[in-house]
Image: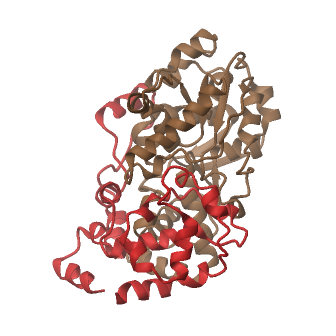
Amino acid sequence: MKTLREFIAEHEVRRRAQACYQCGACVGGCPVGRWRGDFNPRRIMEMIMRDELEQLIRSEVIWLCTACFTCFDRCPQKIEVTELITQLKNAAARLGNIPEGELKKAGVIAKDGWAGLPVSRTLKQRAELHLPELDHDGEMAELKKLIGTVSRVGVLRHERSSSDKEEQGTD
Amino acid sequence: MDEWSYNLYTGCLIRSRFPHVEKSARVVFERLGVEVHEVADVGCCPEPVGMRSIDEQVWLTVAAYNMSILSAGGRPVMTLCNGCYSTFRESEHLLSRGKKHMEEVNRHLASIGREYAAGLEVEHFARFLYEKVGPARLKQLVVSPLRGLRVASHVGCHLVRPFDLLAFDDPENPTKIEELLHSVGAEVVNFPRKSLCCGFTIMGVDADLSLKMGCEKLKNIKASGAQAVVVVCPACFQQFDINQRQMERKFDVKLGLPVFYLTELIALALGESQESLGIDQHRTEALSLIEALGLTGE
């Protein structure tokens, strides 16, 4: 698990979680924790501190964070809980652990440059409301190139060569 | 009048799915004397939860790409969506404070002949209406006050959180948009668990839970006596308007709560007609409420 170690070290995930004293203010305010007992930001911070990272990034649970920032706003220790969970998701994504729905959404952005292009009904509605015509749909070449070049995640590198993909598997 | 001039960034959801939202925003800008400039070649901001969760470096780089284009003419950018606002504010913060981030992003941008220079000023339309126009001035411009309309305001997460960065309204009890609604003549009701997330962002992870979160919100709002919900984010709009029927079926409840974008109600109060705003484009029927109250514009 060298990749994960390196990634976590690079983003100082453990150091940034260290001030957590497990008060639970995060889970108290969490809109997801109300419904899913298995999503618990306090527990996630504990697991980071106990070095149970591999277990965390292999679970689906981290993806339930809505990134509402309530835990971060309420944390008495000013720990960036939301951002740390985001880093865990980034690490998981590199290992290919991405929920299907999220994979699909990101794939659309990589393919179209937008998270969804207008369908004909919307174009008709736009015309009825005298809104400006939309230009450049389906192009966005520069933006798409950027995503393909920058990303370390397979789904976003659809235009890269197969040798790049092999290389990505080992990084 | 102040001189207000912005580069307009509508974002994916509004341009592609909710033309009536874009229309109402443009109407409000025009009536308030806000000059908006169109900007070509921009793409998804990218949205601040999914893309950032999968690859933060891509999120940051594409945000910088968009912001480099949106800096055109040295004008600030006007966003119509909490998500776009969050992406641009958060990434501007990371880039302007972190030299390493900025160097890496610009190394990538250089490959397509672009560069981002820190300091883009980013505005959210609701914040603009509160801070630059203000409830008092807005009130003076009202020609058809929204008398008899009782609404609940759901501000959404990314206009108010994280507070340390955005410092707009109290995230635990946001009231500034309510002040705007008062100023155009609407009555505003309070409701329990007002500041909880609408649940939209986890639709791709756990659709049942996402709908349950949205449904609980709408149930609380309905129980508070509100006739409609007012939002300032197209993700919240999608969750409450488009997905409402699905929630009713799934959880066997009757909601029937019209959902308005803040700018739609303001445009009506400023005298715009419901026809020109395309209120009939909502998925959850909204027209009969404003017709019953005689709030269909001039």
| Residue plotted at (41% across, 77% down) | B108
Q: Nearer the viewer, residue B284 or B41?
A: B284
When asked about the image quadrant of residue A83, the answer is: bottom right
Q: Position of residue B101 (x, y in %)?
A: 53, 79
What residue is at 41 percent from the left and 56 percent from the top?
Answer: B41
Locate the N terminus of chain A and report the quarter of the image it occupies: bottom left
In the image, residue B298 above or below residue B206: above
Q: Colour of chain A?
A: red
Residue B46 visible in image = no
Report the residue at 30% width, 37% height from top.
Answer: A119
Q: Colour of chain B?
A: brown
Q: Give the residue displayed 45% in from the left and 65% down from the top.
A: A62
Where, by quadrant of the figure, is residue A53 drawn? bottom left
Q: Nearer the viewer, residue B159 or B145?
A: B159
Asked if B140 appears above or below B162 in the picture, the reply is above
Q: How many marks?
A: 0
Q: Quadrant of residue B227?
A: top right
Please, which colouring scheme is shown? by chain
Residue lying at the far left of the rendered structure: A162
On-image quarter of the C terminus of chain A: bottom left
Residue A8 position within the rendered picture, expressed as x and y whole percent measured from the top left: 47, 83
Q: Residue furthest front?
A: A37
Residue sitting at the far right: B136
**Residue A31 spot, x, y in % from top left:** 56, 51
Q: Is residue A163 visible?
A: yes
Q: Position of residue B292 (x, y in %)?
A: 59, 9
Q: In the picture provided, is B228 more to the left or to the right than A106?
A: right
